[in-house]
Image: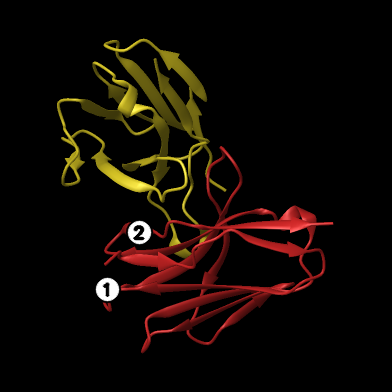
Amino acid sequence: RKEVEQDPGPFNVPEGATVAFNCTYSNSASQSFFWYRQDCRKEPKLLMSVYSSGNEDGRFTAQLNRASQYISLLIRDSKLSDSATYLCVVAQGGKLIFGQGTELSVKP
Amino acid sequence: GAVVSQHPSRVICKSGTSVKIECRSLDFQATTMFWYRQFPKQSLMLMATSNEGSKATYEQGVEKDKFLINHASLTLSTLTVTSAHPEDSSFYICRTGGQPNYGYTFGSGTRLTVV
């Protein structure tokens, strides 16, 4: 079983759609959780940290359920510029464990 | 925020040659640098952790004699892929340690193609 597992993609959605990404992690001792965005052939960039209380940043909402070891990312009113690969990332003892990524393609 | 400069961004080399990738921290002292490899459509996999002035720690399955890491100063860490083979073709990327909630700083990555 992978340490961090994400929805297999790709997700192809029209502009304005709402899209949800799911992620599960296997190590209950994981300490911090993040969503990163990676554009093709580029480095990952932090989208948002994820907290148990849930957090929102504009059109993006992230949720963490420690009991279920589950993380989610919701994107509302998707834009063409949201097209990228979204990486679920879990921090364990100073190391970052990456999910395989879920590719999102937003079409006009 | 912290800036890490990684180069080259892209390199094509012949099989059997060695390639050195550099990551420089431009505005802070990076005591620790993490090196990752990413194959197409796959996640970033940690290869090794380098600490300034000491030997790197390699992840299971990563050959330390093939992937030489040097972290001789607080501003420079290097990864040398020795005797490169086509299967070493990948995206290599470094990142510093940092403040989790402010994000970790990644280099811009190096795309290595071995022909």
Location of residue A42 by image quarter: top right
Q: Is residue B30 visible?
A: no
Location of residue A93 by image quarter: bottom left
Instruction: Please report, as a chain letter, where disc 1 is located.
Output: A
Badge 2 density bin: few <14, some 14–19, many ≥20, Cα 10 Å? many
Which residue lies at the image location 84% right of the left edge and 57% below the top edge?
A108
Q: Are marks 2 and 1 in contact (CB under 8 Å)?
A: yes
Instruction: Please report, as a chain letter, where disc 2 is located.
Output: A
Q: Earlier in the sequence, mark 2 or mark 1?
A: 1
- What secondary structure is found at the residue carrying circle 2? strand
Location of residue A32 by image quarter: bottom left
Gap between marks 2 and 1 measured at Cα: 10 Å
Q: Position of residue B16 (x, y in %)?
A: 26, 11
What residue is disc 1 on?
A27
**Left or right: B67 in relation to B4:** left
What residue is disc 2 on?
A97
Q: Is residue A83 visible?
A: yes
The amino acid type of the residue labelled 2 equals Ile
In the rendered structure, the colour chosen for chain A is red
Q: Position of residue A107 (x, y in %)?
A: 78, 56
**Left or right: A66 in relation to B56:** right
- What secondary structure is found at the residue carrying circle 1? loop
Which is nearer the eye, A21 or B29?
A: A21
Q: In the displayed structure, would residue B77 be above or below residue B104?
A: above
Badge 1 density bin: few <14, some 14–19, many ≥20, Cα 10 Å? few
Q: Position of residue B1 (x, y in %)?
A: 57, 48
Q: In the displayed structure, would residue B71 be above or below residue B85?
A: below
